[in-house]
Amino acid sequence: MFRFAKAAASVAGKILINVSERLLFLTNGPNFHRQYGNALLISGALFCAGVWGYVLTQTGITWNLSPIGKVTPKPWRE
């Protein structure tokens, strides 16, 4: 039983050390999102808008958004 308790204490100690190191890094380490978050969000939105602007205006895709007025019924055959 002593070996089991010693092993359990060792594992718990390692877990506490890992958690404390992680918290130390989070509080003192670089904060990527605080530094670059807004710039990345804005640049991504501009890139997306630019790509869609190109697709809508330059590629010549016919979108066929609504069939109203474009679909006519066939004449009835008797």
Image (cartoon, rainbow, N blue to C red):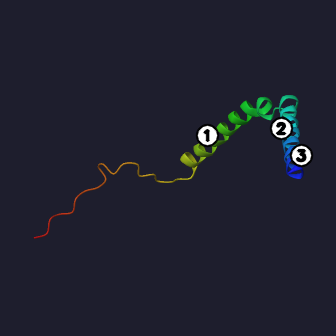
Mark 3 falls on what kind of element?
helix
Mark 3 Cα-neighbour bin, 10 Å: few <14, some 14–19, many ≥20: few
* Left or right for 73, reference 30: left
Of the two numbered discs 3 and 2 in the rendering, the one whose residue sits closer to the viewer: 3
Report the residue at 36% width, 48% height from top: 66
Q: Nearer the viewer, residue 36 or 1?
A: 1
The Cα atoms of the two marked residues, 3 and 1, are separated by 54 Å
Tally the numbered discs: 3
* Left or right for 39, reference 1: left
Amino acid under label 2?
A: Val
The residue pinned by badge 3 equals 10
Mark 2 Cα-neighbour bin, 10 Å: few <14, some 14–19, many ≥20: few
Query: Can you say whether 70 is above or below 49 in the image?
Result: below
Amino acid under label 3?
A: Ser
Mark 3 near mark 2, Cβ–Cβ under 8 Å? no
Residue 75 at x, y percent in the picture: 17, 63
Quarter containing the C terminus: bottom left
Residue 22 at x, y percent in the picture: 84, 37
Residue 67 at x, y percent in the picture: 33, 51
Mark 1 Cα-neighbour bin, 10 Å: few <14, some 14–19, many ≥20: few
Mark 3 or mark 2, which has the lower sequence index?
Answer: 3
Report the residue at 69% width, 35% height from top: 41
Where is residue 30, by image quadrant?
A: top right
Mark 1 falls on what kind of element?
helix
Mark 2 or mark 1, which has the lower sequence index?
Answer: 2
Residue 19 badge: 2
Amino acid under label 1?
A: Ala
Where is residue 23, by image quadrant?
A: top right
